[in-house]
Amino acid sequence: MTLSNQLSDLRLFRQYAYVDGKWTHGTTGREEAVIDPATGETLGHIPVLEADQIRGAVDAADQAFAQWRALRADERCERLLAWYDLLQANREDLATIMTLEQGKPLPDARGEVEYGASFVRWFAEEGKRTFGDTIPSHIPNAALGTLKEPVGIAALITPWNFPLAMITRKAAAAMAAGCPVVVKPAHETPFSALALAELAERAGIPAGVFNVVLGDAPEVSKLLCDDERIKALSFTGSTRVGRLLLEQSANTVKRVSLELGGNAPFIVGPDMDPHEAALAAVAAKFQTAGQDCLAANRILVHESIHDAFVEHFAERMAAMTVGNGMQGEVDQGPLIHGQAVDKASAIVDDAVSRGATLVAGDQSQAPGPNFFMPTLLTGVTRDMQVWCEENFAPVAGITAYRDDDEAIAMANDTEYGLAAYVYTHDIRRIWKLLRALEYGMVSVNSVKMTGPPVPFGGVKQSGLGREGGVTGIDEYLETKYYCLGALGSVSGS
Ligand SMILES: NC(=O)c1ccc[n+]([C@@H]2O[C@H](COP(=O)([O-])OP(=O)(O)OC[C@H]3O[C@@H](n4cnc5c(N)ncnc54)[C@H](O)[C@@H]3O)[C@@H](O)[C@H]2O)c1
Ligand SMILES: N[C@@H](CC=O)C(=O)O
């Protein structure tokens, strides 16, 4: 299935980079194919930009900065709201592009477009509330205060699992603050980013404010990190690459925000109905085929309901349909590529070789080479990869615990600290777990936890900073302190 015959607006499918308001091809003719993970077919090609073209994108952002920051916040808000309206109006095409390049089922892709657009609306409004402070003066005859100013150009490096929302959550915050952006999307899913650029242009976002560069990831990222004109780097992706970018940004002392990997525990208390908890756990595990930083990786169930929980979990899992996300109502699409399938197999083999029980997950049923059937392992232990690594696959590992203290120790037994789920109706247990879990986000009795008003982010090796919410825009703002001296008798107020 090619992209061009699936869209009602063909101009949303762009096979170029987008720099300084222009669609740009590489100077050497180097290009990369973009593959539909469900079918293995080539959807299109993208250019590999050369180093001077990447620098050219930073030049464009640099030139656009003065004009963009000089707009009033309400003027930037209008442009961003126009972008939001266009995202909504083109939801179906954007979802189609996403499903074809990423693989997630079409209803999930529609949900992501909605989710991604919601950040644009949120930050359009938040841009009008970047208030400074007045400070009671300790200096005679002076007035003191702070102003908020845009930090400068922001480089945004994003992953393939949420190809649209991971861009808008960063870009809308930066642009609302007055910062131009240079986006480097994952090479697996560039077309969503390029469709965003097309719609930004239609929304009247000036040339140079929203740029999309494409190329060799380590090379492009290094160029962006080394460029002194870029003041903020916001990265979403693996902890391994996040560490590298943090190190590479040290020389130019950038503001660095990192949204990295997770290894979420899902704790089920003894008071829970095992059926209700199992349905929630399946939803928390298998969205985006488990390729979600919030995926419930380690499911910890109180020993008194463990067996019943496993039974319900396996039953719900067996009802899941796996297939091409473009075809009807499938619950789970393919993984992003063959390496992801190999990694999932290796994790399952490792667990089984160390004593886990493979309850379900017959890979001979997979409908294609990039598919991995939902898999359930029980008796998982801390020496297994499925426990200590972010598996990023539809592989659920369940284990039993005796009491709350053991559940807390197990849940915290990881270098990651992004999100944790707690299922129990016992308020004392809820409070104890909420306080003891070393995670940036804890969701109690709810699979859904994200959205624009939420300060999204992790602790430990899961990242630095928060995106979204009322503080998300601060990642792109400097605080300028002022002291107005020699004011005479007005001081002291
Ligand atoms: N915390 C969050 O909000 C959040 C959200 C989504 C995904 N993630 C994490 O993202 C990871 C999956 O995404 P991924 O596989 O695309 O991650 P990744 O780290 O491999 O890639 C992310 C981005 O970095 C680029 N990149 C890859 N290698 C690079 C290198 N050596 N130097 C510079 N840039 C490089 C990629 O091209 C891509 O644009 C998971 O760990 C997941 O948990 C986190
Ligand atoms: N589901 C997450 C993305 C993680 O992969 C989000 O909502 O940001």
Image (spheres, rainbow, N blue to C red):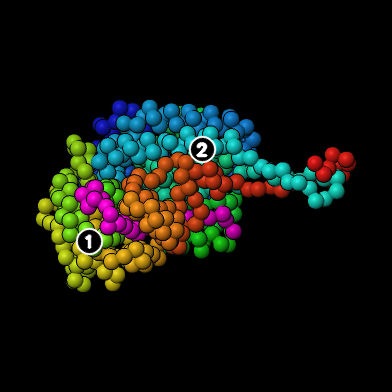
* Image position of 345 (left or right of 436): left
Number of callouts: 2
Residue at the outermost right position: 488
Indicate the quadrant containing the N terminus: top left, top right, bottom left or bottom right.
top left
Q: Secondary structure at mark 1?
A: loop
Residue at x 22% of width, y 61% of height = 304
Pointer 2 residue:
123
Mark 1, other Cα within 10 Å: few <14 / some 14–19 / many ≥20: some
Which residues are drawn in magenta?
253-279
Q: x, y percentage for residue 22?
A: 47, 36
**What residue appears at the point 37 percent right and 64 percent down from the top-left corner?**
408
Quadrant in which the C terminus is drawn? top right
Which of the 4 image quadrants contains residue 403? bottom left
The picture places residue 305, in percent across and down from the top left corner, at 21, 58
Q: Which residue is mark 1?
A: 304
x and y, in percent, of residue 190 in the image: 37, 44
